[in-house]
Image (cartoon, rainbow, N blue to C red):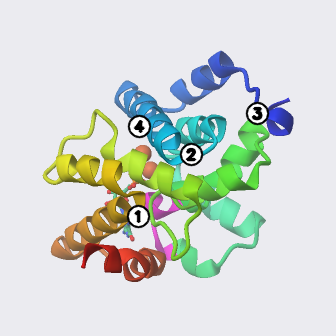
Amino acid sequence: MIAADLSFDREKILEKIRSAMSEKRFRHVLGVEKAALELARQYGCDERKASLAALLHDYAKEVDDQVFLDLIDQHQLDEDLKVWGNNVWHGIVGAYKIRHDFGIEDQEILQAIQRHTVGAAQMTLLDKVLYVADYIEPNRDFPGVDEARRLAKECLELAVAYETAQTVAHLAKKAIPIYPQTIETYNAYVGYLQ
Ligand code: GDP
Ligand code: FE
Ligand code: FE
């Protein structure tokens, strides 16, 4: 029973995740698990939760938009969510699909998945581990990723701040709308960079 003790059948879960996404994304997911486990060990986070959250975090990334719109109605989520797109939905709304498809009821895991793209003003250790691991996993290659990896070893909150500032700058530069919760994360953590 997945929800009860987290002694999940790893092979079964991996197969289900693999069949829901491209090979490239599956490799990313395994990289996020590796990074999340390293951070969990360093910062004293529950390793099984970090592992499961990492494996599941992008499960909904290749799901049709209509599925998210239906989930928003079904769970009576904020109607304002509907103007956003997959990038914002796959975590915040995707967690409802993950709960359904995998029988995951652990709220800490579901919350970390919900927050993995946009963060939150007050993140738990597990939230931060997944948020940062997603950004620094070994397959990532973009300007600033090595700095993010270095900061993650030094201070997890500093890495959250750095990642959020980079993301906000990246989105603004490309004139992409920024989800309000991303700004809240930025404001809550930017002090670490000063
Ligand atoms: P991935 O799923 O592993 O690719 O990584 P994320 O879930 O962290 O991010 C998915 C995409 O959402 C990336 O292209 C981010 O730049 C983008 N993103 C992050 N925050 C926001 C936001 O506030 N608004 C919008 N529109 N996109 C965002
Ligand atoms: Fe994601
Ligand atoms: Fe990801």
Disc marking residue 157:
1
Q: Alpha-carbon distance for marks 2 and 3? A: 18 Å
Q: Quadrant of ligand 1?
A: bottom left
Whether residue 36 can be seen here: yes
Q: Earlier in the sequence, mark 2 or mark 1?
A: 2
Horizontal placement of 185 versus 158: left or right? right
Q: Earlier in the sequence, mark 4 or mark 3?
A: 3
At label 2, the amino acid type is Gly
**Residue at mark 2: C-beta within 8 A of ligand 3:** no
Nearest to the observer: residue 2 or residue 86? 2
Q: Name the residue rendered at 80%, 48% in the picture.
A: 105
Q: Earlier in the sequence, mark 2 or mark 4?
A: 4
Give the extent of the magenta segment: 83-89
Q: Secondary structure at mark 4?
A: helix
Nearest to the observer: residue 89 or residue 69? 89
Q: Secondary structure at mark 3?
A: loop
As drawn, 7 above or below 111? above
Disc marking residue 44:
2
Disc marking residue 35:
4
Q: Are marks 3 and 1 in contact (CB under 8 Å)?
A: no
Disc marking residue 167:
none
As drawn, 103 above or below 147? above
Nearest to the observer: residue 80 or residue 59? 59
- The residue carrying mark 3 is 6
Where's residue 153, x and y in %? Answer: 33, 47
At label 3, the amino acid type is Leu
Q: Alpha-carbon distance for marks 3 and 1? A: 27 Å
Where's residue 68, x and y in %? Answer: 60, 58
Q: Earlier in the sequence, mark 2 or mark 3?
A: 3
At label 1, the amino acid type is Glu
Where's residue 71, x and y in %? Answer: 69, 60
Quadrant position of the N terminus in the picture: top right
